[in-house]
Amino acid sequence: MQDLKKDPATLDAALKYLYQYSDCNRQTFIANLRAMNVNSGNVFPVATYTVNKYKNEAKELTDEKAALYKANAIPKTITLMVAPPANQNQASAVALDGAAPGAQPSQPAAAAAGPPATVNTLAAGSTEPADTRNWDVRLVFGMTKPDQLLDLYGKGNVELRDASDFDGNDAGKAWVVYPDTENEMSVIFYKDSTKAITFGQENAKWRAPFGIKPGDPIEKVQKVNGRGFKINGFEWTNGGTVNNFEGGQLDKKGVQVLFKALNTGDPKLYDQFTGEKTFRSDASGVKKLGVIVERSSSGPQTDH
């Protein structure tokens, strides 16, 4: 077998074919990479690279695949390959109504969440098993030790990694659930049994406390808080992080939010919100910047 790492052109062709077989469906493509035993740390970067590279050819590749099937140029069933699911957005979860952050779940955690549904070898046109995992992070708030994470999500889905705070400083070690995927979640356990839970992927399925997740517009955070709040100027120490929730609903709740601006092309406008200063979330001009949540974290207020 060729060493594809030494032949970029052939590697691209192989990825293109696999992406085409997956009907240019990102989740199916990721499932196929895993079915081929691609290293878990490489799956997400490879998927992102491939999707971006062929994003303008998706329709063409899908149409070509149909023609190849018709001509029997490729088989409709390939060992280990996963067909595009008809119900990829279907999910079920165990309700935790009335549970509060820090409370123990009302039923055994292992039964509530469990390991990811097994992806079986399926023929083209078949459906992928429904995702029955529980994405409510209140399960994690009820934990007291890392072993509970391993029991809940499976040892193969949890890794111990170096952690950093929102400003890039060393924050010790974190247990990362579903590493290098869209559902990556970082959990730091402290000696006093408190923990910090951080999210950084926009398409994650997790239902976080207060409903704040990466990709949310600043207007949503302001609505949840019930009033405007102060943010540290971008491109400076603690740039883009909330400085003060100003006594709103999120104040002193252990919630940390890092924002980023999408529209920075107007230097005159952007300069108003950069540097050693703070600005209000409801200030004139913030909306034009397209400010969204980059990372969010829930945890203790005290320093560790």
Image (cartoon, helix red, strand yellow):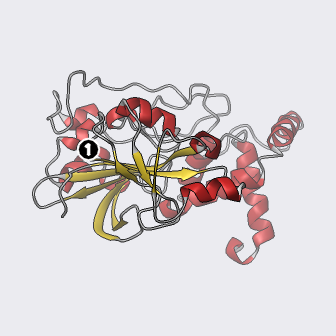
**Three-letter amino acid code at disc 1?**
Leu
Q: Residue at x 58, y 48 (%)?
A: 30
Q: In the drawing, does residue 72 fall left or right of residue 237?
A: right
Q: Which quarter of the picture shows residue 140?
A: top left
Pick the quarter of the image with the N terminus. Answer: bottom right
Q: In the orientation shown, which residue stands out farthest toward the bottom?
A: 6
Residue 251 lies, in percent from the top left, at 27, 41
- Disc 1 residue crowd, few under 14, some 14–19, many 20+, Cα 10 Å: many
Q: Residue at x 29, y 23 (%)?
A: 95
Q: Residue at x 55, y 55 (%)?
A: 273
- Confirm whether residue 295 shows in the render: yes
Up-down relation of residue 89 to residue 232 (above or below): above
Give 118 or 57, whichever is nearer the viewer. 57
Q: In the drawing, does residue 176 fall left or right of residue 252?
A: right
Residue 225 lies, in percent from the top left, at 36, 34
Up-down relation of residue 269 to residue 64 (above or below): below
Residue 209 lies, in percent from the top left, at 31, 36
Give 72 or 292, whichever is nearer the viewer. 292
Q: In the drawing, does residue 106 fall left or right of residue 54?
A: left
Element class at badge 1: helix
Q: In the drawing, does residue 205 fall left or right of residue 273?
A: left
Q: Residue at x 78, y 67 (%)?
A: 10
Residue at image mark 1 = 152
Give 213 or 206, whichever is nearer the viewer. 213
Residue 190 lies, in percent from the top left, at 17, 60
